Amino acid sequence: MSTAVRPFRIAVPQPDLDDLNERLARTRWSPQLPGHGWERGVPVDYLRELAEYWRTEFDWRAQENALDEFPQFVTEIDDLDVHFLHIRSPEPDALPLILTHGWPNSFVEFAKTIPLLTNPTAHGMPSARAFHVIVPSVPGFGFSAAPRELGMKPRTVARMWVELMARLGYERYGVQGGDLGAYVVQEMAIAAPDRIVGVHIDGGIGLPTAADVPAMTADELTEWDLMQKWQTGVNHHVLLRQAPQTFAHAWTDSPAGLLAWLAHKFSEFAPLADDLDDAYDRDQFLTNAAVYWFTNTAATSSWPMYNGLGDDGFAWPAGQKLVPVGVYAGGSALMRRLADRDNRITHWPEGNTGNHFVAMDRPVQHASDIRAFFTKL
């Protein structure tokens, strides 16, 4: 196995871009089903307008050039090429920090957060804590190679990231992630607690399961019942555990189909917003969609669902008391009790808000909270 770290630049061939635009122009649109708004899924009129914007106004080359401003590399780990961004801070005492993206997202998730972390003074933020930032693409996502066999799990990715950080010469560092990234960063702490300063997670820690019900108080049981009513939407864990290849045929052949799928999930992941455009910058959302399209990773990124996030399918991220844990948005007293049971919580703010992909939705607040957590350590 080669341990070389090779420079990388995004350079989508022009025929691939032309093909995308031609496919968008030739989209065969479905009829609009009866109903109101998004209750049957992504409305036809909304998707047609978004697809037309993607084809005629969205500037992939400008976004590609902006991403290429970040130093990018590829290195082989466990026989897979891993793509990553590595941006060093000008601050001499900067802390190395590895960020892990979620699903169905990519390294694009952190494009707005990175400058705020590496060079806070240039963006009007105090210089108390700056970071050397590393953003890998999870295997099967973006420009990283896809797993070739069954069995890829967050703990596998965690061990790969520990190797990546060692290969870059970092002996002590912080870890941060949300969504899929929240699973990976906790597993990193379990795998290498002596190397990790702290674990920062966007949210979702301390969520109860049916196993917690017998020990709940009456008030907690009422909260548990409300939580069950809030769980709505398309269950992608079930869908992609059962038939990822079936659905991926359409997402791989039709950019409008891929766009509909991503718009549906990003909309579900934005409960605080009136609409998708209110939660996420349209060009950043489409840049993520374009990365999925050009790298053909709609199928290969589904491994967290068909392999399962836990040992027996779906489970919340594992807790650990080896390394301090901070959360961007703390939850209720019930969630705090369960989080403390399984973690060493040192940062639990209750005033932070934002939609699921908070690095895209609230980049300034996200960066500020990461800095606040690691400043305490």
Image (cartoon, grey):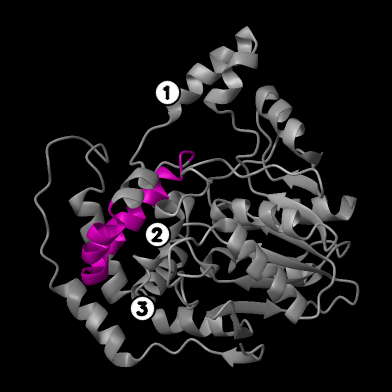
Which residue in the protein does label 2 denote?
302
Q: Residue at x 30, y 84 (%)?
A: 17
Q: Residues within 10 Å of mark 3 (few under 14, many from 20)?
A: some
Which residue in the protein does label 3 denote?
294
Quadrant of res 136: bottom right
> Does the magenta stretch mainly form a helix, a strand or a loop?
helix
Quadrant of res 104: bottom left
Visible residue check, residue 368:
no
Between 7 and 300, the one nearer to me in the picture: 300
Residue contact between numbered discs 1 and 2, judged by CB atoms under 8 Å? no
The mark that comes first in sequence, 3 or 1, is 1
Between 273 and 88, the one nearer to me in the picture: 88
Quadrant of res 36: top left
Residue contact between numbered discs 3 and 1, judged by CB atoms under 8 Å? no
Q: Residue at x 80, y 43 (%)?
A: 321
The Cα–Cα distance between marks 3 and 1, rounded to whole angstroms, is 38 Å
Q: Is residue 256 magenta?
A: yes
Between 377 and 207, the one nearer to me in the picture: 207
- Kind of residue at badge 3: Phe
Q: Is residue 237 magenta?
A: no
- Kind of residue at badge 2: Ser
**Image position, residue 325 (x, y; %):** 77, 46
Mark 2 vs mark 3, foreground winner is 2
Mark number, residue 229: 1
Q: Say what secondary structure mark 2 lies in.
A: helix
Q: Residue at x 10, y 64 (%)?
A: 28
